[in-house]
Image (tube, rainbow, N blue to C red):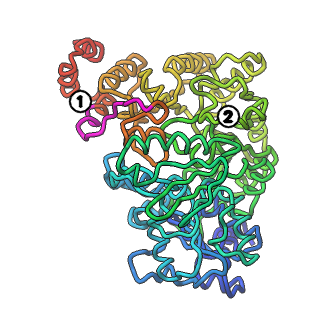
Amino acid sequence: MDQEQRNRNYLTDWTRWLPTTQKEVEGRGWDVLDVILFTGDAYVDHPAFGAAVIGRNLEALGLKVAIVPQPNWRDDGRDFKKLGKPRLFFAVSAGAMDSMINKYTANKRLRSEDAYTPEGRIDRRPDYPSIVYSNILKQLYPDVPVVIGGIEASLRRLSHYDYWQDQLKPSILVPSQADILVYGAGEQVLVRLTSALQNGAKISELTSIPQTAFLQKEFEKKDGDRILFSYEDCLNDKKKQAQNFKPIEEESNKKKARRLIQATGNEYVIVNPPFPPMTTEELDACYDLPYTRLPHPKYKDKRIPAYEMIRHSVNIHRGCFGGCAFCTISAHQGKFIISRSKESILKEVKAIVKMPDFKGYISDLGGPSANMYGMRGINENLCGKCKKPSCIFPAICSNLNADHRPLLEIYQAVDQAPGVKKSFIGSGIRYDLLVHSYENGEWNKAARDYMQELIRNHVSGRLKVAPEHTSLATLRCMRKPEFDTFYRFKKIFDQINKAAGLRQQLIPYFISSHPASTEIDMAELAVIAKSLNFQLEQIQDFTPTPMTLSTEIFYSGYHPYTLEPVFTAKTPEEKLNQRQYFFWYLKEYKQQIIRSLHRLKRPDLIQKLYSC
């Protein structure tokens, strides 16, 4: 058999994937499935896709698992019936992204492409798939437990503001009718959940599993429970919704968290504390499962945009201790970094090298933040008492081990792996960790060495970083470092490029209309961008997403930690007035911006932008 034929077999042997149809189930000799997983994404058997991770972990527990990707919710439900009833439960996930962020822009317009759907089609998933799929399953099979999870469910586990409906909504448990909700990464939960169900427990009895949420008619208060304002209280008083956020965020970021209780209607939403962070060995085991790293053969010759981006990438850790006000990562994955071993990472690199389309280039060695690998508390007993959402804001914690040497070892080991020509870093860099002056001189040297290694060897012409804004008040609201930190990093970036004879670009990412940002702040941002010779490309109008500090401020008008009012641009006119300054260099915006600056009585900024 020649290599081309072997490659064809490699790409089309459907037994290497989890089954998606009755024919594939029967082909494995199975009569009954244990778990059937419904997902809003196409089925890509890759560890960057949540459905594949959950499916493979359930399979590793010895269960018979099938995946139904992007079921048709508009017809008679045949996609929901085709595999029958599972022995244990239905699992439901909206997909790797929040469905509404995935589907709509900040202006609430349909996006032109769904990155997790073949050919980018935008008609293959409903709004809020977690609710839609769960409702259909409950109607068809009322006696079968439905477990919802993934980022959409995770961030809606309690009352939350929904930007697209412009309403405060109750826990997603209410409209979905699901029996139980798994928040965060679900591997540890699934072991406990499936074990209990296999031992004959009823889903309604599973009230003590960590990292789950559920509804109960009544509850027995335990010592330490944090009782939140009810959903109805929050509906009637926005400040109470803001007040709820602080305990929710604190308990999400503690190693020893407490239960959260919120009355909703005539029931209570009970959120159990999360599991302790996974160990390196546990995370390795998750990534070492037999993923094909490929889309299911049913998508033959069809482009799946998200897969094209990550097919040759390696995720080296989970978690992020940045605590950015607008980001959902810590709310979902937690702030504690869980890093894979070098052996597990190299094992995955070896698998990538064997892929038929691999040309020698690893597209990303990253994670939620590229350079947090291996970082943790020096004294972890102190971390166990900490409830701060960020380890690096307002200042880098003195108890944080910010040594970049373990990460440098990973880069060097990957670049030396047989078949690898070069590895790139596509994930975001926390440059504040790199320019900070540590008491430990070895860490300072490691940070300098890391910048040299990164900029000289791992940038594909353009390095994307995220200062987010230039206004001090806005940056503080965002929980981001002062803009001076960016200046310091840019200076080093330019020096290294010059010394190496490179002409690489630094591409900054900025957000308009974030809480605390004013129109004048945006005009001053434009002036700074001009002074740095930036014509901004990586830009975004702030989009409120559930369970973030920024969204609570946007909705309520109050900062949850101080209960002080915070200005936020909300109307389309206010948002457009801020966004226009990103495009100060375009002729079609010049007169509009000049008129705006006259209205704001800031002719000095007109002079700085246009020298007229």
Q: Which residue is mark 2?
A: 386
Task: Residue at 73% x, 74% y: name it.
Answer: 63
Q: Secondary structure at mark 2?
A: loop
Where residue 541 sits in the image (x, y, percent)? Answer: 37, 39
Amino acid type of the residue that numbered disc 1 sits on in the rendered structure? Tyr
In three-dimensional space, the C-alpha distance between marks 2 and 1, rounded to whole angstroms, equals 48 Å
In which quadrant is the C terminus drawn? top left
Q: Left of 134 or right of it: where is 257? A: right
* Main secondary structure type of the part rendered in magenta: loop
Viewer-closest of 66 and 426? 66
Residue 474 to residue 281: above or below? above
* Residue at position x 52%, y 21% in the image: 486
Q: Residues within 10 Å of mark 1 (few under 14, many from 20)?
A: some
Tell me if residue 591 can be seen. Answer: yes
**283 in magenta:** no
Q: Nearer the viewer, mark 2 or mark 1?
A: 2
Which residue is tagged 1?
589
In which quadrant of the rendered image does the N terminus lie? bottom right
Name the element at disc 1: helix
Question: Do residues under tags 2 and 1 come within 8 Å of each other at their CB atoms?
Answer: no
In the figure, residue 203 lies in which quadrant? bottom right
Q: Quadrant of residue 412?
A: top right
Image vertical order of residue 246 relative to residue 135, above or below: above
Q: Which residues are magenta?
A: 563-577
Location of residue 21 in the rendering, given as x and y in whole percent from the top left corner: 58, 80
In the image, what residue type sits under mark 2?
A: Cys
Q: Residue at x 64, y 34 (%)?
A: 458
